[in-house]
Image: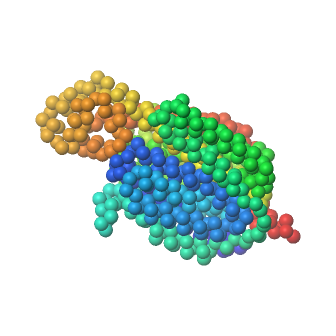
Amino acid sequence: MTHKQILLVIVGLMAAMFLSSLNQTVVGTAMKTIADDLAGLSLQAWVTTAFLIVSTVSTPIYGKLSDIFGRRPLFLAAIVIFLIGSLLSALANNMYELSIYRAVQGLGAGGLMALPLTVMGDILAPRERAKYQGYFLAVFGVSSVIGPLIGGLFAGADQIMGIAGWRWVFLLNIPIGIVALVMVMAFLHVPHTARGARIDWWGAVLVVASVVPAILVAEQGRHWGWGSPIALAMYATTVLATVAFILVERRMGDDALIPLKLFSSSTFSVATVLGVLIGFGMFGAMMTIPLYLQMVSGATPTESGFLMLPMIGGLMVSSIVSGNLIAKNGRYKIFPVIGSGMLAASFLWLAFASADKPLWYILVGMAFAGLGLGQLMQTLTIASQNSVGHADMGVATSSATFFRQMGGTLGTAVVFSVLFGVLPSALRSAFGDPATQAGIAAAAADPRVLADPANQAILQLLQNPAAVGDSLNGDSSFLIGADPRLAAPFLEGFANASTTVFLVSFAVVLAAFVLSFFLKATPLREKSGIQEAHAEAS
């Protein structure tokens, strides 16, 4: 393909990627407002997890079907499904409905996540691919900058054109998605050679049966009890479904949803495990930081979006630098080592955060996290694609994305479970501090504090100490405008609970750092997937 043809294809890919990445940043920033409006802060993990479960499960299906039927029809279907889910999400009346509609959205997002990377593997050689990463980073960077701003503006508006402000977070996807749909139809024309293959229906069913129970027990384990009968049933279902899935995949051979032959490559295997660990740490902690900024630092949704810029800036800088170095010398082994090391260091730094720490302390940790992630995201994908031939490009790329998303899904569910599991004890501990008690007593004796309506919810809560532990599980807006002495124990309690999340993420990413030394960096190929397919055909 000529440079012009490659650029036209990339334009189509970028349009769809912009839709997906913008949605993620907009929703993430507005989630606290959405949860408060629908009275379900503790249920927000369901909204996030539902999206991640379905997008994770559908990712390898998109990859396999695109190998059989071509990239273009699957990509178009993914955009349409994503738009339907967006419209439904805007109509949600409670957190449970929103979770279901976000699952529909996730069904489309699975294709938007995996297929652009697969197409890149088709048209560019692994070594050459790094030179084009800047285009995609520009899309990610722009969406990451304007997404939080848009999400904050919508979340901060009571109504826009008679519709609740946060609902426009989802309605915004409609015009953008229509533009993306038109651009993909116009520009995405990648050659495809039809080939017969069996569709691995049982594999698709069993991957759902193995993933969903694992996520459910991670999310609800603290409510059910980790050793309760229903939790044990979830464990057993996951194990049995996973064993059955492996047996089915072995029988399906090359037609399997995730062909087991991919794991015969040590490079693919190690890169896959690294993806799971990095996804766990990244998604889990990254969902906690915006909450921390809003709950503890007092940032508005819009401000918390802007405060994510150090992480985005670090990610873009390290991605561009590492991409150019890979394109120049063809070596990439050092980047997963440095990247996972910096990411682990950032989580360890954040684990020492507290309510009295200055804002710059959090921003430094976020910047280091971004610098680490930028060296990991593209490198692990390139390593996985470089370890397989063109015939398996789609399934290899989608499988790598699947396992990374699987780690992210589990990470999100586990860290939110940990966060709201330790939060009651953290709040009780904060309220038990003598200095805090003295501050509360002084505030309660101040007539101006007693007369201020902004303090009434906390004052009423203090009359029932047993309710303090669950006070932040629903609507946390009662802290807005409250006297600092009354709000202090809530902020300190949430901050202390958050540090537990960062410690869990640190431990997981530290394991990835150790494993990164065992990644075998095979030489990057000089031909694109299309060139290899043409050479094989001739």
Q: In this view, does 288 lie above or below 222?
A: below
Residue under the point 47% across and 57% down: 101
Residue under the point 62% across and 47% down: 209
**Residue 25 location in percent, x, y?**
47, 55
- Quarter of the rendering containing residue 520: top right
Image quarter hosting the C terminus: bottom right
**Residue sitting nearer the eye, 11 or 60:** 60
Q: Is residue 118 above or below residue 405?
A: below
**Residue 410 location in percent, x, y?**
56, 43
Judged left or right of residue 334, residue 317 is left
Residue furthest to the left in view is 447
Q: In this view, does 352 lie above or below 367?
A: above
Residue furthest to the bottom in view is 186
Residue under the point 43% across and 39% down: 361
**Residue 363 location in percent, x, y?**
44, 44
- Quarter of the rendering containing residue 180: bottom right
**Residue sitting nearer the eye, 15 or 230:** 230
Q: How many marks?
A: 0
Residue under the point 72% across and 52% down: 258
